[in-house]
Image (cartoon, grey):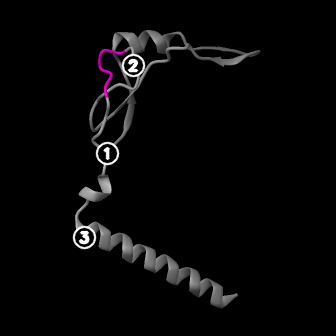
Amino acid sequence: MTSAYRCQSTVCRKAFARVTFSEENGVALPDDLGGWKSSCCHRCSNPRCPDHGECSCLDNLMDRMPPMSDQLFQRLRDAVLEEDEADDDEE
């Protein structure tokens, strides 16, 4: 499983620290809002961050999944379709 987390580099921490809130205007975000990282590649989304970079670890994920997963998805899809048809028959 992959998750996203806030980048803790100096550049991004400073940007997150400048987020402000007021009753009149709501949330004010700085132009260079800090970045986010993916747990699979740990690259920051903020171009100004030294950890910035493209994250390609999720590219072609479905191609890399084992055939067994494809079979599981097919069974799940068939079960949902059967359930939908049964619900339609009851109405």
Residue picked out by circle 2: 47
Whether tag 2 and tag 1 are in contact, CB under 8 A, the answer is no
Instruction: Say if 51 sits above or below 65 in the image.
Output: above
Secondary structure beneath label 3: helix
Instruction: Say if 58 sits above or below 74 in the image.
Output: above
Mark 2 or 3, closer to the camera: 2
Q: Is residue 16 left or right of residue 85?
A: left
Callout 2: few (<14), some (14-19), or many (20+) C-alpha neighbours within 10 Å? few
Q: Quadrant of residue 84?
A: bottom right
Depth check: 34 or 53 in front? 53
Tell me the quarter of the image containing the C terminus: bottom right
Mark 1 or 3, closer to the camera: 1
Q: CA distance from mark 2 to mark 1?
A: 20 Å
Magenta segment, which residues?
49-53
Instruction: Say if 29 sits above or below 38 in the image.
Output: above
Callout 1: few (<14), some (14-19), or many (20+) C-alpha neighbours within 10 Å? few
Residue 5: x and y, percent?
A: 38, 30
Residue picked out by circle 3: 68
Q: CA distance from mark 1 to mark 3?
A: 19 Å
Residue picked out by circle 1: 58
